[in-house]
Amino acid sequence: MKKDVIIKSFKAAFPYTLPIFAGFWFLGLTYGIYMNVSGFSFWYPMLMSLTIFAGSAEFVAVNMLMGAFDPLQALAMTLMINARHLFYGISMLDKYRGTGKFKPYLIFGMCDESFSINCTAEVPEGADKGWFMFFVTLINHFYWFSGSTLGGIFGSLIKFDTEGLEFVMTAMFVVIFLEQWLKEKNHTSSLIGLGISLLCLIAFGSDGFIIPAMLAILAVLTLVRKPLEKDGDAA
């Protein structure tokens, strides 16, 4: 692989990760501070953000570490929190094909944000798909790792109200969705996703609608995949 191709892949990937920086870094700081005030050394958020790399699970893990040792409960909780990644993985089977040595890390580091970018971004001419997706995943991983570590180190020195900070991630996903909406020529799949999510929200409530919504979206889009692909070819 030529050096200029690697550099071009990095330059192409980096701008896509900039919107992720604000959400990951500030939430990572919040997580590190939370670990600090809970009595844990900065080594905990540093190593957990490096090896787990699942924000929601890491926040929940704080209470697990402070409670009684129960590995089965930890396993069940983690699977429930991150069950959505099963659907992400299925949808990325074609995308990750041919990525070679990068594939294990791409699977490990596939968070919501890296999935959104690697699933929708167009790799520019002259860049390599494997290197592009690797850099997207690696940079996002570094944002979370650095924020969590700094929060753990300086947590005792920082005094501010973090209430509502988690909305940064919601706002970021709205922006990603709107950007994808503007790129689409046919909004059928987006409208299907919105409609099914709304129905599941009404039926299951805000705490339990995500998995039913994803299952329903996966089933419906599988059924209408061929008509959607024909419409895309026609467009």
Image: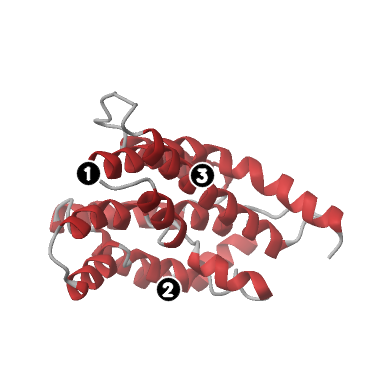
Q: CA distance from mark 3 to mark 2?
A: 34 Å
Instruction: Mark 3 and mark 2 in contact? Answer it, CB < 8 Å.
Output: no
Describe the element under mark 1 as helix, strand or loop.
loop
User: Looking at the image, which residue is at 74% across and 53% down?
Assistant: 9
Contact check, label 3 and label 1, Cβ < 8 Å: no
Q: Residues within 10 Å of mark 1 (few under 14, many from 20)?
A: few
Q: To which residue does mark 3 refer?
A: 143
Q: Nearer the viewer, residue 162 or 231?
A: 162
For marks 1 and 2, the one nearer the N-term is 1
Estimate the x, y position of residue 227 in percent, counting from the top left.
50, 69
Question: Could you tell me which secondary element the residue under label 2 belongs to?
Answer: helix
Q: Is residue 62 visible?
A: yes
Nearer to us in this view, 98 or 154: 154
Identified at 63% across, 61% down, the residue is 234
Res. 38 mark? 1
Q: Is residue 99 visible?
A: no
How packed is label 2: few (under 14 Cα within 10 Å), some, or many (20 or more)?
few
Pointer 2 residue: 222
* Three-letter residue code for mark 1: Ser
Q: Find the distance from the CA under tag 3 to the CA under tag 1.
A: 22 Å
Q: Bin the neighbour count of mark 3 within 10 Å (Cα to Cα): few under 14, some 14-19, many 20 and up.
A: many
Residue closer to the observer: 172 or 7 = 7
